[in-house]
Amino acid sequence: MRSRKNPYAKPDRYTRAAKEAGFPARSVFKLEEIDRRVRLLRPGMRVLDLGAAPGSWSLYAAQRIGGAGKLLSVDINPLTVALPNQAMFAQGDAFEVGDDLLCRFAPYDVVLSDMAPSTTGNRVTDQARSFELFMRALAVATLGSAVGASFVGKIFMSDDLPEAREEIRRHYDSERLIRPEGTRAGSMEIFLLGIGRRS
């Protein structure tokens, strides 16, 4: 029986462009597109990046918020890049890291979550775990965000998506679904945004 090819094994144009620009992963272009489309990041903002490793989103966010901003990056795995002085990295599980640490630079203007589960090959299981990670990120965002803040969270498309969207609408003035151009063709991932955190 011939094994299926791994679509992630071969570098594509986004992977090559990311390396050339000094970012460790192609995911930077997903955040760049989201930022461009909704004007997400600005100088001086306070940002929380959940699921930060290997570090592309954190590097991009740090560049956009500049030296006057503050960035906290969290991941269970270490980053592969050095962050600038306005950024801090905390290694740990998003479900176990204390709220006191997660709110270190709160209130946040933007909470980012590129968290994804270690896939099992079982579609239903992977979708359920993705939903769980998304809801954890959203809970952190609602705890530590400023009024008017934004949230960006990755989630796998599934029957749980309407519930995730409804939860966004409970806390934010508007919600959007964005599937960036750089998303691989066979990927289940999509990004759910909340804009304008209500008090």
Image (cartoon, grey):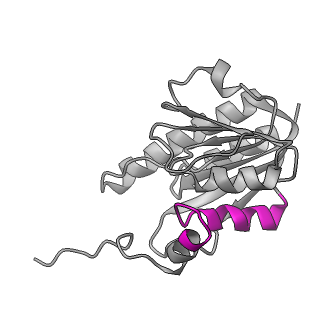
* Residue 198 or residue 95, whichever sits in front: 95
* Residue 134 or residue 96, whichever sits in front: 96
Question: Furthest-left residue in view?
Answer: 1
Answer left or right for 146 relative to 132: right
Note whether 67 is above or below 37 in the view shown: above
Q: Position of residue 168 (x, y in %)?
A: 73, 44
Note whether 195 is above or below 140 in the view shown: below
Total numbered badges shown on the rendered structure: 0
Q: Position of residue 110 (x, y in %)?
A: 77, 44
* Residue 50 or residue 162, whichever sits in front: 50
The C terminus is located in which quarter? Answer: top right
Answer left or right for 27 relative to 141: left
- Residue placed at 10% from the left, 77% from the top? 1
The image quarter in which residue 4 lies: bottom left
- Residue placed at 40% from the left, 50% from the top? 126
In the rendered image, residue 30 lying in the magenta stretch gets the answer yes
- Residue placed at 66% from the left, 31% from the top? 140
- Residue placed at 82% from the left, 49% from the top? 66
The image quarter in which residue 48 lies: top right
In the rendered image, residue 22 lying in the magenta stretch gets the answer yes
User: Which region shows up in magenta?
Assistant: 19-39
Identify the main secondary structure in magenta: helix
Q: Position of residue 127 (x, y in %)?
A: 45, 51
Answer left or right for 160 relative to 11: right
Note whether 32 is above or below 194 in the view shown: below
